[in-house]
């Protein structure tokens, strides 16, 4: 990242846009700390809590924040998930992990997260994350697809609230199905191919339940593509 221009890649840029302007935010599993550095430097947020699983994991973020002279506006926290937070934050970001892990962190940290608006970027297992959010008492309020080279990253925004999603919505996204953005076509085509490949493997293994689930998923992605 150019520290003067504070450029972010498309994935982090989309997350930053969804964070919006707020007094403070927390980044669980902040990795290199670029998102927090950008939000602070541009004045989008006034204070940030950057957390990671170990002190070693926070090293890169500490170095970046120090170089930018932002230490007085950052609280570095070591801990597992929301357990690292010592107070409530209006916005919490959990990005760059598997959907199942993000779901676990949200479920186990539900009380500590309080009424925070969650901005989640799962690399895989989108359906499992949506289902887990629904069961943990969160409603999905926004979904974006951020293209970055050959990859299309899904970003989910969730807030405390009741929601009930159909299988179609869990697989393809309740908001994405309503908005059908231009980025939906390559996203849906990719996951259609993934499901077709998984079906071929399941048929060799003879797992009837998995085969049935994959057949339904393939039909959903094919129908989504027809609607575009």
Image (spheres, rainbow, N blue to C red):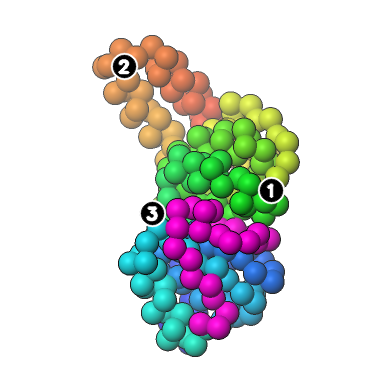
Regarding mark 1 in the picture, which secondary structure is present there? strand
Boundaries of the magenta span: 71-94
Mark toward the viewer: 1 or 2: 1
- Image quarter of the N terminus: bottom left
Packing grade of label 1 (10 A; few <14, some 14-19, many >=20) is some
Residue at image mark 1: 159
Choose between 18 and 152: the one closer to the eye: 18
Please tell me whether residue 116 is drawn above or below residue 208 in the rendered image. Answer: below
| Residue drawn at (70%, 52%) of the image | 115
Front disc: 3 or 2: 2
What is the C-alpha distance between the residues marked 1 and 3? 30 Å
Q: Nearer the viewer, mark 1 or mark 3?
A: 1
Of the residues under marks 3 and 2, which one precedes in the sequence?
3
Q: Judge whether 35 appears above or below 176 on screen.
A: below
Whether residue 78 appears in magenta in the rendering, the answer is yes
Q: Position of residue 156 (x, y in %)?
A: 58, 49
Pointer 1 with pointer 2, Cβ within 8 A = no
């Amino acid at each position: 990242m150019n520290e003067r221009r504070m450029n972010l890649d498309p994935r982090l840029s989309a997350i930053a846009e969804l964070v919006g302007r707020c007094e403070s935010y927390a980044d669980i599993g902040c990795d290199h700390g670029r998102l927090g550095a950008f939000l602070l430097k541009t004045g989008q947020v006034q204070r940030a809590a950057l957390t990671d699983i170990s002190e070693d994991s926070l090293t890169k973020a500490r170095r970046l924040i120090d170089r930018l002279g932002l230490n007085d506006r950052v609280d570095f926290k070591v801990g597992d998930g929301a357990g690292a937070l010592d107070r409530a934050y209006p916005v919490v970001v959990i990005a760059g992990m598997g959907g199942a892990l993000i779901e676990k962190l949200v479920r186990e940290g539900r009380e500590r997260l309080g009424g925070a608006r969650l901005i989640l970027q799962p690399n895989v297992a989108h359906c499992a994350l949506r289902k887990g959010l629904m069961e943990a008492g969160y409603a999905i309020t926004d979904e974006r697809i951020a293209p970055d080279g050959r990859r299309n990253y899904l970003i989910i925004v969730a807030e405390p609230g009741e929601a009930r999603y159909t299988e179609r919505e869990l697989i393809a996204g309740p908001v994405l199905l309503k908005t059908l953005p231009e980025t939906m076509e390559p996203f849906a085509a990719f996951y259609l191919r993934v499901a077709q490949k998984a079906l071929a493997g399941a048929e060799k293994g003879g797992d009837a339940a998995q085969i049935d689930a994959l057949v339904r998923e393939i039909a959903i992605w094919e129908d989504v593509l027809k609607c575009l």
